[in-house]
Amino acid sequence: MGLIVWLVIGGVVGWLASMVMRTDAQQGVLLNIVVGIVGAFIGGLLFGGSINSAVTVMTFVSSLVGAIILLAIVNLVRRGSLR
């Protein structure tokens, strides 16, 4: 059950981050899930959370911030600008 929650929340977080960074047309569902899960890891490192903690508003927001940072880094590397 935990894996399904990770995939669903990761997909939502990745989709929201791609909407904020205006990269939604470039990535599909699978990449949204990957961005969301990696963003959760980055957010956990930045804000001292755990990837195994319960889904709360704070963990959701930290995952979203981590995903936005990840997409900003990818945009910076690919295009040379944050966009």
Image (tube, grey):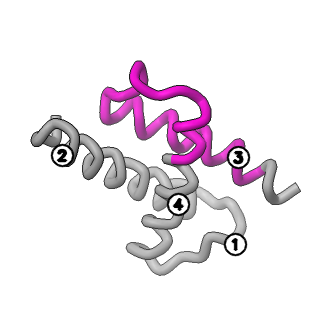
Question: Marks 2/3: CA distance?
Answer: 26 Å
Question: Please, is residue 74 above or below residue 65 in the view?
Answer: above
Locate residue 11: give its quadrant.
top right
**Residue at 59 percent of width and 42 percent of height:** 33
Identify the mark nearer the N-term, 3 or 1: 3
Q: Are marks 3 and 1 in contact (CB under 8 Å)?
A: no
Seen from this angle, which residue lies furthest bottom? 48
Q: Residues within 10 Å of mark 2 (few under 14, many from 20)?
A: few
SS for callout 4:
helix
Identify the mark nearer the N-term, 4 or 2: 4
- Report the front residue among 31 and 14: 31
* Amino acid marked by disc 2: Leu
Instruction: Give the residue number, with chain letter if any, for mark 3.
Output: 7
Instruction: Give the residue number, with chain letter if any, for mark 2.
Output: 76
Q: Please name which of the two marks, 4 or 2, marks the residue nearer to the observer.
A: 2
Q: Residues within 10 Å of mark 3 (few under 14, many from 20)?
A: some
Question: Marks 4/1: CA distance?
Answer: 10 Å
Identify the mark nearer the N-term, 4 or 1: 4
Question: Please, is residue 77 above or below residue 52 in the view?
Answer: above
Instruction: Give the residue number, with chain letter if any, for mark 4.
Output: 40
Question: Marks 1/2: CA distance?
Answer: 30 Å
Instruction: Give the residue number, with chain letter if any, for mark 1.
Output: 52
Question: Marks 3/4: CA distance?
Answer: 11 Å
- Report the front residue among 80 and 69: 80
SS for callout 3:
helix
Question: Marks 3/1: CA distance?
Answer: 13 Å
Q: Please name which of the two marks, 2 or 3, marks the residue nearer to the observer.
A: 2
Q: Are marks 3 and 4 in contact (CB under 8 Å)?
A: no
Question: Please, is residue 27 above or below residue 17 in the view?
Answer: above
